[in-house]
Amino acid sequence: MNRSSHGFPGRTATGGLLVALVFLGQVHAGEPHHPAPAANGAIGASVEELLEVVRTMNPELAAMALEAEAAAARVKGSDLLPDPKLQITFDDISENARGYPGSVDTTKFTVQQEFPLWGKRELRRQVAEADHRRAQGELATVTAELTGRLKTVYAEYHQIHLSMEKNEELIGVLRTLVRVAQSRYALGAAGQDEVTTAEMERGGLVAELVRLGSDRKRLKARLNALLNRSPDAPIVEEPRMRTIPAASVLDFGQLMARLAEVNPQLVQERANLDAAQSTRELASKEWFPDVGVGLGVVNRREEPDSFEAMVEMTIPLQWGARRAREDETAAMERASRSRLEAERTRLAAEMQEALLALEAARGVEQVTRDSLLPQAHIALQSTLRNYETGGGGSIQVLDAVQRLKKYHIEQIKAQYEQQMRLADIERLIGGEL
């Protein structure tokens, strides 16, 4: 029997639709997606837009900025002199007839001022300035971590969006496959199992699409939490990811030079080391006495007023306490130096790991995009045409669909991994590339 197109009504149109769906998947896989303009006040067309919002609206960053401002205020008063003292002395108090204190013959009014010498005030200011730099480093650390979390969640949000797009395309292919299988079954050219299997595969993709939609809502809530917005505030449905920098930009030596200069954790550790050094120097200065001066007016009854002056100094006799303080501050300085070196080593390892992972993911995406996906599309077209003309079975088409889905997943995972590692690199260097 001649199995021409007249044997299967609508087969040519159906086959054309199947091929069109496959080519639609190729277009989506090969061309960048440009989201439509945001509506209803939705934000998040790009991660840069959300970064601007989080830097101005996040309450955690606002609190850290106020703490840094408080540390700056402490610097202003760190090297000021202590408050002067006013002393009033009553001398030559006579007794009255009952034996109680009577008249005062001499009254002294003395003003005293202590002067820390030997550079102690400057060292105290250096400690306060280091504390301010530490607070700024903490603010930069929180900012880098927060923006890193935002980039990660946004990348996951984009991953979900791409997965939903690809699932919808494959659902369209399987929906058409079901119609073809039903037509063949009606003509006795296919078994009921072909229709059932195609329906089950389509149903599985629909269920997965529902799960992805739920995940997208969850990620929207996480994004809004980072932005200090209500959980149901609108976020753009079609996000746009950043372009991954070229390999020449991601040079380990250049990135490490930037990391060594501005990494927030290193800024903190260097500030801690500076504070420890100044504190140790200040402890060594405690062996030198502070000096106080005073000027007074002496008022005697029935005599002219006179003046007096005084000089006082501390006597550093508590040697044990001072030695203990010196030992303590020296140990703290060594500990700060060790932490700084350990942090440098850890950050260098993190940078190397992030760069290697990004380049590996870039390679996986390139192979998947340029080789595996085109071959999977060709295989699907071939099996569809074969099935359309009455050859083969639906199982071959379903296998081709599964392979195409697998490679789509690998491509999306590779894109997500690159965005994750880019966020790690930018967190380490304390800013965007």
Image (cartoon, grey):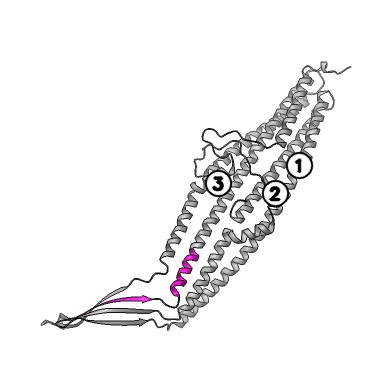
Crowding around mark 2 (Cα neighbors within 10 Å: few <14, some 14 to 19, many 20+) is: few
Q: Amino acid at mark 1?
A: Thr
Please report the bounds of the magenta region as a residue range: 107-131
| Res 289 quadrant in image | bottom left
Whether residues under marks 3 and 1 lie with C-beta atoms below 8 angstroms apart, the answer is: no
What whole-number distance in Å separates the C-alpha atoms at marks 2 and 3?
Answer: 22 Å
- Residue 22: x and y in percent read 75, 30
Quadrant of the frame with the N terminus: top right
**Residue 35: quarter of image:** top right
Disc 1 marks which residue? 368
Q: Is residue 112 magenta?
A: yes
Which one is nearer the viewer's eye here, 151 or 31?
31
Badge 1 marks a residue whose secondary structure is helix
Measured from the top left, where is residue 189 in percent x and y? 82, 21
Earlier in the chain: of badge 2 and badge 1, it is 2
Report the Cα–Cα distance between label 3 and label 1. Answer: 31 Å
Question: Which residue, given by chain and number where applicable, does mark 3 sit on?
Answer: 51
Q: Is residue 332 magenta?
A: no
Instruction: Determine which of the numbered discs, if any, sits on residue 246 in the image.
Output: 2
Amino acid type, label 3: Leu
Q: Residue furthest right?
A: 1
Label 2 is placed on what type of residue?
Ala
